[in-house]
């Protein structure tokens, strides 16, 4: 994840526009972008991807759980849900520029 996206994710968290942890699976219908760690367990990935697809949710894969958790002050996170459409679009642009 590039520095710009890393910082933006932290800001979105402080603005309460991010859901992470066990609440992600139950809140997918409220979200606009799902960030999912590629090294998540196969079961978690399968479940979250299926539910995200059923809700028409865009998914972006982040290489590691540590990389996904760091901007939010966590050691590791499997998934992060962005609940604002405008914020999701902006973050997606920043993530895409970093590749």
Image: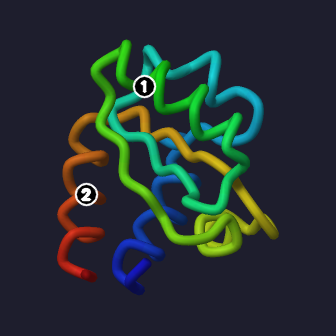
Check disc 2: other Cα within 10 Å, few if <14, some if 14-19, many if 20+. Answer: some
Total marks placed: 2
Image quarter (top left, top right, bottom left or bottom right) of the N terminus: bottom left
Q: Residue at x 36, y 23 (%)?
A: 53
| Residue that appears at 42% across and 25% down | 52
SS at mark 2 in the image: helix
The spot of residue 22 in percent (x, y) is 76, 31
Furthest residue in direction bottom, as rendered: 3
Label 1: how many Cα within 10 Å (few below 14, some 14–19, many 20+) = many
Q: Which residue does the numbered mark 2 point to in the structure image?
A: 92
Distance between mark 2 and mark 1 Cα atoms = 16 Å
**Badge 1 is on which residue?**
52
- Looking at the picture, does residue 55 appear above or below residue 5? above
Q: x%, y% of residue 88?
A: 29, 46
> Left of 24 or right of it: where is 3?
left
At x 68% / y 37%, what residue is drawn? 44
Q: Nearer the viewer, mark 2 or mark 1?
A: 1
Q: Residue 26's quadrant in the figure? A: top right
Residue 31 position by quadrant = top left
């Amino acid at each position: 994840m590039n520095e710009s996206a890393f910082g933006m994710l932290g800001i979105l968290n402080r603005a309460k526009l991010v859901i992470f942890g066990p609440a992600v699976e139950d809140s997918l219908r409220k979200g606009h972008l799902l960030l999912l760690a590629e090294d998540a367990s196969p079961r978690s990935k399968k479940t979250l991807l299926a539910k995200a697809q059923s809700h028409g949710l865009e998914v972006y894969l982040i290489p590691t759980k540590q990389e996904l958790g760091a901007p939010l002050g966590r050691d590791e996170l499997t998934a992060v849900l962005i609940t604002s459409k405008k914020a999701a679009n902006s973050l997606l642009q920043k993530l895409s520029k970093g590749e």
